[in-house]
Image (tube, coloured by chain):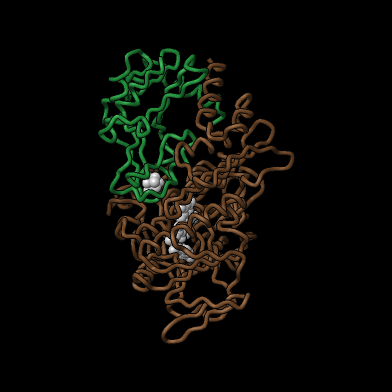
Chain colours: A brown, B green
Amino acid sequence: MHYVIAGAGPAAVAAAEHLRELDGDAGVTLIGVQSQPPYSRMAIPYYLTGKVGEEGTYLRRTEDHYEKIGIDLMCGEVVSVEPGTHQVVLADGQQVSYDKLLLATGAEPIIPPVPGMDDPRVQQCWHLEDAKRIIELAKPGARAVQVGAGFIGCIILESWVLREVNLTVLEMGPRMVPRMLGDKAGSLLQSWCESKGVKVHTGVRVSAIESSEEELQVVLDNGEICPADVVIVSTGVKPRLDYLGGSGITIDQGIVIDEHMQTSVPDVYAAGDCAQGLDFSTGKTAVHAVQPTATEHGRVAAANMVGANNLPYKGSLNMNVLDTLGLITCSFGAWEGVDGGDYGELYNPENFQYINLQFKDDVLVGANSVGYHQHLGVLRGLIETRMPLGPWKDKLKDNPVLLADAYVGVNQAALQKAQ
Amino acid sequence: MHKALVMKADACTGCHQCEMMCSYGKVGAFNPAKSVMDITIFDGGAVNVPSTCTQCEDAWCMVVCPVQAITCNPATGAKEVSAEACVGCKVCSIACPFGAINYDPDSGVVSKCDLCKGEPMCVEACPTTALAYVAQDSTGYERMRHNALLAAGL
Ligand SMILES: Cc1cc2nc3c(=O)[nH]c(=O)nc-3n(C[C@H](O)[C@H](O)[C@H](O)COP(=O)(O)OP(=O)(O)OC[C@H]3O[C@@H](n4cnc5c(N)ncnc54)[C@H](O)[C@@H]3O)c2cc1C
Ligand code: SF4
């Protein structure tokens, strides 16, 4: 049996290692386009701040890790998939045969279709190479404009501030991280950033970037102009699918996969940022493009590839945690609430604290928090297990801070019942 | 078979000695806020529940970590955090459904129970039988965990 994985990010590596664990005799080949060992995009912000060096971004810490456990690393770009002959074709013309194939090619940044984006002082922050280039451009005192305050934008923002640039953030949505935080949480985050000296404009669109030798001018749709020495573009991501033309694999927002992580084509699976998989909260499919979903996808796909589709997936819970200049925000599941639902809220703007818990009957279905960092994981535990909260629901509505107590209390009650 | 840290709510008096020693072991100061063993007090002290990481085999935190900062100590089975490798991204702290791994803003990295390399200080500190570090089969620990997970629908 030969398993081939296209891509070499977290989803790919999680899958490769699990394939190895489950099927000791099979061949496992990982094909990645980068020349360096598989690394984590997530670690790039910490490379930018100097917290870790390049090696600190690698997914595995020992050099011979893959060799030692019998995973073949191949450097190359997959340019087409041919399910008929069970082959993938690389950019240099090489053909690689597979028995089962996993597509884990991740996502790529969306570049807004406005003039001027091709100036070398306009940078995305996606590859390690981008990070290296940004380090050169973002000198202390430089005027930096970040276009986009989505979740990745709000993580990397800290890197610029620590590099002592003069930062302006532009967001098209009505608030910061509009797809992860509600109004109150997003506004708290904005005032926090402003209190740290970052200028934030929401509800604005960039219509062009004009460049001269001395500077860039970011032109907004309201006519305003922001001068800049460097522009960082962080306006969202889209699955990387360019190599799938002619493969017959069904694509919607991403590669559509079923509950076994299989694509519409037999023996071809997909995982991570490129995949549109089952969402735990909605029961529909979605592209999450976050690390927890990517690694979970990888493992579940591996299990189904080995076990002939016998491990149906319950879907991934969308979740995220951000640390923006020291303010920690998080979101889980149906944070916007569900029809016929109910909620509990704590709002303490003086201390930049906020918790919003969304319920359906007496089950937690989603949450947002700002300014808390202890026991956040219990939110996942409560949502994914659909544990009835019983009397704890009212206590939580009165005081959402009691989350961890509620979790222990509910579990304790369940344990007693089971004994 | 690794030994396991077994926690019994019915024997816990809520004295917080374990939290004190745990924090001392972790950060060198008696500060329950830095403890990774937590005692939750219910009904004004009528019920006290100790909880910490159960060292899951395919630990969520370990699988999700983008830089392999969490590894399994083969001697104890504990999932240990490398403070040098951890970048402080916190993704493990939302991925652990038990809330048993948490970010410490003072150190910039996460902290969790590592069984003190096989000599858990909380167990030493506990004046009752609420905390014990014993061979797993002799205690029905696996059954306990199994029941807990079943009850939790995991
Ligand atoms: C700056 C930044 C910060 C982030 N922070 C967080 C965070 O805090 N929390 C969180 O949950 N998520 C975060 N993310 C998102 C997270 O990194 C992704 O969800 C995760 O990397 C997805 O893993 P993946 O394996 O699916 O894809 P990727 O990590 O994108 O890996 C795909 C790999 O495949 C390679 N590849 C692509 N196409 C081909 C091809 N045709 N042939 C061969 N190889 C190919 C790519 O080069 C890449 O190495 C962040 C992302 C960025 C950029
Ligand atoms: S906070 Fe540290 S240990 Fe946790 S996932 Fe991030 S890097 Fe790994």
The foreground one among B18 and B57 is B18
From this viewpoint, which residue is outermost toward the front?
A350
Where residue B71 appears, as percent x and y from the top left, is 33, 41
User: Based on the displayed image, in which of its 4 quarters is residue A176 positioned?
Assistant: bottom right
Q: In this view, does B57 lie to the left or right of A340?
A: left
Q: In this view, does A344 lie to the left or right of A195?
A: right
Residue A119 lies, with reference to residue A98, above or below; the image says below
Looking at the rendered image, the quarter that the N terminus of chain B falls into is top left
Residue A363 lies, with reference to residue A306, above or below; the image says above
Looking at the rendered image, the quarter that the C terminus of chain B falls into is top right
Residue B140 lies, with reference to residue A263, above or below; the image says above
Where residue A87 appears, as percent x and y from the top left, is 50, 62
Q: Is residue A334 visible?
A: yes
Q: Is residue A142 left or right of residue B82?
A: right
Where residue A377 appears, as percent x and y from the top left, is 49, 38
Q: Can residue A313 be seen in this view?
A: no
Who's the residue at 35% across and 36% down the image? B79
The foreground one among A70 and A359 is A359
Who's the residue at 53% across and 16% down the image? A416
Where residue A246 appears, as percent x and y from the top left, is 60, 68
Q: Is residue B103 left or right of residue A395?
A: left
The foreground one among A132 and A418 is A132
The foreground one among A95 and B78 is B78
Who's the residue at 63% across and 24% down the image? A391
